[in-house]
Amino acid sequence: MTMTTLSATLAALLIATPAFAQPAEDGVDPSSPAPIVAKNRVNLRIGGASTDETSRPTVCVDVSIVLGFAVESCGTGQGLWHHDEGTEMAHFRATYAFLERATAQGTGRLRGGLGFAELQVGVDQLGFHFGSPDPADRGSVAGPEASLQGQWLVPLGKGVEAIASLTAGVAMFSKANELVIPKSNVQPFVSVEVGVGW
């Protein structure tokens, strides 16, 4: 099939579709479902991340601020609700939704994030140590990170939404190679979580 034949066939199919054959006066097809707009303010998600080796799930708390800006924190909760040793990374970032689209199935959005991460290879100590690892046991170090995140939100009713999130990014640590278990100073990461919000 030539490109001309393929184009003609595609045009014929589009013209034969009721939405194109009988457009509404305002240009909106009355038979198509209305877009579902999810206005999420706070959500809690649980999933996993490529940087976590503690066998604990990644937990994210995400709070919208204003005009597409939000703050988000993700990690396994080491030092808060568990003290399991093992490599894990906690994330603290501000995000901005630069693209959002509502469809009949839900709302999708893309967000960019900037913040910092803490890479831990032992028991979490208090505070964040930028530059050199913490002096107590050289078990953690902090540094800047950047991320790109895609989210899909589906309203469940009464202002509650189901949410799925996929995040990819990179964190940089100036002296992660000085940790008690040496690590690369550049740490890419990927995480996936699902949860609910309102």
Image (cartoon, helix red, strand yellow):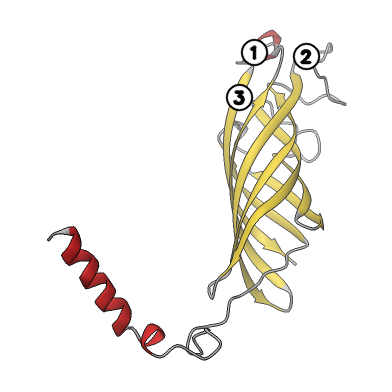
Name the residue beneath numbered marker 3: 187
Mark nearest the camera among 3 and 2 is 3
Q: Earlier in the sequence, mark 3 or mark 1?
A: 1
| Three-letter code for the amino acid on which mark 1 is drawn | Ile
Query: Is label 3 in contact with label 2 (beta carbons under 8 Å)?
Result: no
Name the residue beneath numbered marker 2: 133
Q: CA distance from mark 1 to mark 2?
A: 11 Å
Q: From this view, report whether residue 117 is shown above or below residue 165.
A: above
Q: Nearer the viewer, residue 83 or 45?
A: 45
Name the residue beneath numbered marker 1: 181
Q: CA distance from mark 3 to mark 2?
A: 15 Å
Q: CA distance from mark 3 to mark 1?
A: 14 Å
Q: From this view, report whether residue 125 is shown above or below residue 158.
A: above
Q: From this view, report whether residue 65 is shown above or below residue 54.
A: below
Q: Local crowd at mark 1 within 10 Å, few (<14), some, or many (≥20)?
A: some
- Left or right: residue 137 versus residue 169 is right
Residue 67: image quadrant is: bottom right
Residue 4: image quadrant is: bottom left
Tell me the SS state at disc 1: loop
